[in-house]
């Protein structure tokens, strides 16, 4: 139950940080210890969230470059990049895709 609540809070924070500079995560009674129930209250900034994202993106960009190479393609062979899914609304992901392929190639 606590894990599901953490996942839901993470998803909500991700969505909020796509349009806000920071968000508050507040999970009352997320766990309990011998001293009683514990509540998680923290603020997550977009900068910190983007730092987490960059760790994941580095590996994904590496895999993308390998896939292009294995297919005998370069970035210049790509006419457009179509972003699908909620995570593509995260500003750092859009910025990184633009940096990799160019803004004119980005489609939503």
Image (cartoon, grey):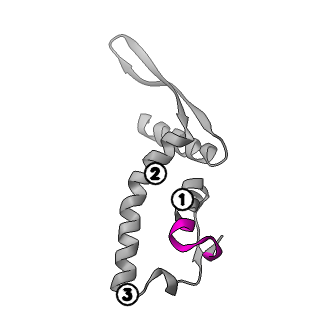
Q: Mark 3 packing: few (<14 Cα in 10 Å), some, or many (20+)?
A: few
Res. 68 image quadrant: bottom left
Cβ atoms under marks 1 and 2 closer than 8 Å = yes
Q: Mark 1 packing: few (<14 Cα in 10 Å), some, or many (20+)?
A: some
Q: Pointer 3: what residue?
A: 71
N-terminal of the pair, mark 1 or mark 2, is 2
Res. 57 image quadrant: bottom left
The residues bearing labels 3 and 1 have C-alpha atoms spaced at a distance of 23 Å
Is residue 90 in view from this perspective? no
Q: Is residue 33 above or below residue 80?
A: above
The residues bearing labels 1 and 2 have C-alpha atoms spaced at a distance of 8 Å
x and y, in percent, of residue 54 in the image: 44, 53
What range of the chain is rendered magenta?
97-105
Q: Which mark is residue 93?
A: 1
Q: Is residue 84 above or below residue 75?
A: above
x and y, in percent, of residue 77 in the image: 50, 87
Residue 100 is one of the magenta-drawn residues: yes
Res. 103 image quadrant: bottom right
Is residue 41 in view from this perspective? yes
Q: Pointer 2: what residue?
A: 53
- Residue drawn at (56%, 46%), measured in percent from left and top? 14
x and y, in percent, of residue 13 in the image: 57, 41
x and y, in percent, of residue 41 in the image: 51, 24
Cβ atoms under marks 2 and 3 closer than 8 Å = no
Judge left or right: residue 43 versus residue 18. left
Q: Main secondary structure of the magenta part?
A: helix
């Amino acid at each position: 139950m606590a894990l599901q609540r953490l996942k839901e809070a993470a998803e909500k924070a991700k969505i909020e940080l796509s349009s806000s500079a920071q968000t508050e995560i507040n999970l009352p009674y997320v766990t309990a210890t011998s001293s009683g129930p514990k509540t998680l209250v923290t603020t997550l900034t977009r900068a910190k969230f983007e730092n987490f994202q960059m760790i994941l993106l580095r590996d994904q960009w590496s895999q993308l470059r390998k896939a292009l190479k294995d297919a005998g393609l370069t970035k210049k062979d790509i006419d457009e990049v179509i972003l699908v899914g909620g995570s593509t609304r995260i500003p750092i992901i859009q910025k990184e895709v633009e940096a990799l392929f160019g803004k004119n190639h980005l489609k939503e």
